[in-house]
Amino acid sequence: MTISKVLVVDDSATDRFYLTEILQAAGFEVSTAESGDECLVMVKENLPDLIIMDVIMPGLNGFQTTRALSKNAETSHIPVIMCTGKEVTDRAWALKQGAKECVIKPANAEELVGKIKTLEKNT
């Protein structure tokens, strides 16, 4: 699977900007959403190849949004990488909700791009 279009979902403008910079520098086309609710709308409008999802957001949090995506036949094929501040607890729960991978905030550019490349090879 080739990943070219990435949707970054985070309520923090700073984090969205930072992740967008990393991803664009690596050659990805990036769109952004500020909430889980906005993510669900945007995914239907232009199916991304990958979603980078924050955990703590107003409205639907990242876990709820990831679960909704993974249970929907139209979006279950889209891999989600959770971006969290709590490694151990959030990683285990993120994977149970359907996420494929997890990165710790602030995301390390090499680690994030490496995980995306690994997803490309394995999906």
Image: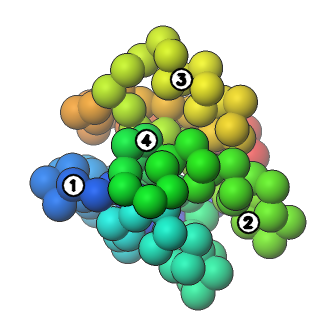
Q: Quadrant of the N terminus?
A: bottom right
Of marks 2 and 1, which one's residue comes earlier in the chain?
Answer: 1
Cα gap from disc 4 to disc 2, whole angstroms: 19 Å
Give the Cα distance between marks 3 and 2: 21 Å
| Contact flag, marks 3 and 2 (Cβ < 8 Å) | no
- Which is nearer the eye, 59 or 93? 59
Quick one: label 2, few (<14), some, or many (20+) residues within 10 Å? some
**Disc 2 versus disc 1: distance between alpha carbons?**
24 Å
Identify whether 36 is placed above or below 79. Answer: below
Q: Would residue 13 be found to the left or right of residue 60 on screen? A: left
Which circle's residue, 1 or 4, is located before the other in the chain? 1
Q: Which residue is mark 4?
A: 55
Q: Where residue 58 appears, x then y in whole percent?
A: 37, 56
Q: Secondary structure at mark 4?
A: loop
Residue positioned 43% across, 41% down in the render? 55
Q: CA distance from mark 1 to mark 3?
A: 20 Å
The three-letter code of the residue at mark 1 reads Ser
- Residue 65 position by quadrant: bottom right
Which residue is label 2 attached to? 75
Can you give x and y, in whole percent of width and height, for residue 117 in the image?
A: 53, 42
Pick whichever of labels 3 and 2 is earlier in the sequence. 2
Circle 1 residue: 12
Q: Can you identify the residue that label 3 sits on? A: 91
Where disc 2 sits, the SS reads loop
Q: Is residue 31 above or below residue 71?
A: below
Please report the residue visible at 54 percent of the width from the left and 23 percent of the height from the top.
Answer: 91
Q: Are marks 4 and 2 in contact (CB under 8 Å)?
A: no
